[in-house]
Amino acid sequence: MAEAIVSLAVERISDLLIHEAVFLKDVKDQVESLRTEPKRMQCFLKDADHNLEQDARFQNRVSEMRDLAYDAEDVIDSFILKAAHQRGFHGIVKRFTSIFTKPYHLHKIGVQVKAIKTKLQNISENLPAFEIPGDGEGSSSIFKVQQRLGRAYSHVEEEDVVSLEVSTKDVMTKLMTEEDRSHAVVSIVGMGGLGKTTLARKVYNHVDVRRHFDFLAWFSISQQCKRREVLLSVLKKVLSPSNDEREKIEKMDEIELRRTLFDALKEKRYLVVLDDIWRSEDWDIPKPAFPRGRKGSKILFTTRIKNVASRADPWSTPVELSLLTDDESWNLLCRKAFPRSKMGSQCCSEEFVKLGKEMVKKCGGLPLAIVVLGGLLATEQSLAQWEMVHKNIHRQYGAVNRILVSSYNALPYPLKPCFLYLSRYPEDWEIPKKELIRLWIAEGFIPENKELLMEDLGEKFLKELIDRSLVQVSRRDYTGTNVETCRVHDLLRDLCMEKAREEKFLEIIPQPLHELEVTLAESMLRRISIHPSKSKVYLKGEHPKLRSLLFSQNEELVELCISNYKSFKFLRVVTLAKRGNYKKWWHVSTEIGNLQHLRYLKLYYYNGKMILPRSIGRLKSLYTLYIKSSFGIVIPDGVFKLERLRHIVIKVDGIFPVRGFRLRLGFTSKNIETLKCIEVDEKAVENNAVLRWTNIQSLGIVFTRAKYVKPTLILLTKLQRLRSVSLSIFDGLDPDLEPLSQYYHLSKLKLFRRIEDKPHPNGHVLKFLPSNIVKLTLAGCELSQDPMVVLEKLCHLR
């Protein structure tokens, strides 16, 4: 992991040399030499990451290198910040030829660079000599990983991971038995890693179960159970409330929530899953909210503690999962280690079988450990590599934990920070894939690449973690094949958190139980994830080296405020949430424009309207801008001058996007991939600048006039990467949607508002639908013609 941190520092120095060369002047050679020494360290650290026989002196050396890499990053970021303040970050440099020519500025960065370099040289004197890769390789490890990730992997679906046929039948039988009593509980019991949640999800998604129950809901409890959130989540799902109703529900106390949920469920046959429940009181307190319901209503538990299951329903015998037998363990390992006989005849050779059976015994019959071991062995194709894995899992750590640690140690270094970053999420959290990859990019874990978009490389990184069974797929997206959300098993999350702290990578800050304030300090790590216990969090204190302020909670329920932006000048990632009075304006602080290193900005405002400051136009490093408000958003022109922006998502609550932000003619970013929602007028139609959006994949458009629809759609047919389009038309006239039939690459289409629905000389009113469409949303279209005449011919429609 230390290698990954040093590598990030090397990338940062390279970025400085490319983008700020004019201002480095006489210290350029010193900064260049600062890059050379860490590259030498990388060669040493590559072996260090795999060396499990490390004494205290060795560990100290690695720790010193990591800390010096962080120091180098601070020097670079401070320099860039000073440059930004004096000449407008990435502005026109010719006007400012005298900037940083003063001896003081040059002297200061020169002294800092020299001090770091001296310390690095002192460390390296006692290290063995390593060949320094030439610049031609540039991030060679990343390049090699990228090449390796291109190989074919056979993804093993969850239902194939563990043989659960008998247990599945037992649970299904219990759920479908129509008992006429209240609070009938079916429990799945077993230790962590046995597959309780996998079994519960398999049953929950089973078509027969879906047909049997009127209403289904799932909630993950975990050790930090928040009973009010359980009630609120189930109630929102059963009522599907409007914005006003949601606001009313969120203000209810627990007694009101219980009563309202009881009334909503009493006429339904329902199934509610409470996953990973630890204490009896976590069920006893919300229990009165769940009525008898229609005959056959059930609660499904997963728990590690048999007594919790027995107390919940003494009349129901829990389904207990047991450890796998030796034969079952070996069969499971083979399915993971030899996907589709990837290694050919080798998988049957005596040497591989002997080593494999010895290693699988160390897993103790625990499916999670076997799956992780199999994911590791699937990446190692030679007998020597298998022998190395066999050797390493016999050293250090507990029996199961050493399997997990070995799999972490074997990760290519670019994947290690990506994995450790998952520790920021709470236990049992469903992690959105798009958000995760955009955060990885903002943190610098995924480098810019000539061959692939960063997002595509991020997809490959995530797939690698899934194939190694370090991450589980939670939900697939509308295509049925791509990941939409993922999660991390409790045992792996524990490892993730332990390693993140050990590597000084990220720490979790819980909010004090009886306080609204969280005080930050410079002694804390550079990435902080706040796990709130209240509906408001106020940040105080100073942490000038803080890079990421992560906020893991349902932003609709919690408010997060920063009192002083100046205390966090190096921030790259931040999420802010605010709750206002009904339809009142939130003027976002102009100080946010001083966060010159910001790459990822997410703002939520509930109950009101939001105005972004003009200073946001100074955030020249911004990759992702996500803004959500209840009633309206004002966007300054400066946003359209941010050339690095890759994702702009502007959302106003409601079923229909009532309005978008008006597109400025100067916005011609080639990097933009997501743009939602923009408002199109005749000026935008006349301007062919949209054709420069060569990487656009997801586009939302609000049309003020129906007459702008056809010329705009004709223009957009030339954007070959476009996969998702959302169209809203608001002048009441009938738009001409015929050009959509030429969108051969489109897989997702949303249409809001009326479509002309009178006899059409050329056929059905929906004849324009693209042939490859997979997901279609028609809202407020007021169709009277039977749409199935067209829909039945769309062979890809899911």
Image: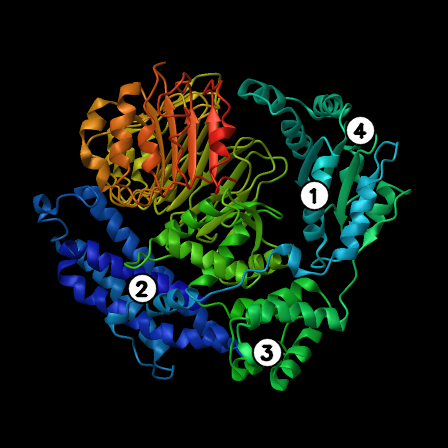
What residue would you read off at disc 3?
347
Instruction: Judge by depth and name the residue closer to the eye, 381 or 70.
Output: 381
Residue 355 sits above or below residue 286 on the image:
below
Q: Position of residue 15 (x, y in %)?
A: 26, 57
Counting residues from the N terminus, which is met first, the one under dot 1 or under dot 4? 1
Residue at image x 37%, y 30%? 768
Q: Quick one: label 4 or label 3, which is nearer the N terminus?
A: 4
Q: The residue under label 3 is which amino acid type?
A: Cys
Query: Can residue 553 be seen in the rendering of this structure?
Result: yes
Identified by mark 1, the residue type is Tyr
**Residue 406 visible in the current orientation:** no
Asked if the residue at tag 2 contacts the one at tag 4, i.e. Cβ–Cβ closer than 8 Å, the answer is no
- SS assignment at label 1: helix
| Residue type, mark 4 in image | Pro
Q: In this rendering, is residue 322 above or below 243?
A: below
Disc nearer the start of the sequence (2/3): 2
Q: Mark 2 or mark 1: which is in front?
A: 1
Residue 409 spot, x, y in % from top left: 52, 70
Amino acid type of the residue that numbered disc 2 sits on in the rendered structure: Val
Residue with the mark numbered 1 = 204
Q: Position of residue 464 (x, y in %)?
A: 49, 61
Separation of disc 1 and disc 4 at Cα?
A: 23 Å
| Other-residue count near label 1 (Cα within 10 Å), few / some / many at <14 / 14–19 / ≥20 | many
Give the residue at mark 2: 10
Mark 2 vs 1, N-terminal side: 2
**Residue pictured at 13% horizontal, 59% vertical:** 25
In this image, 3 relative to 303: left or right?
A: left
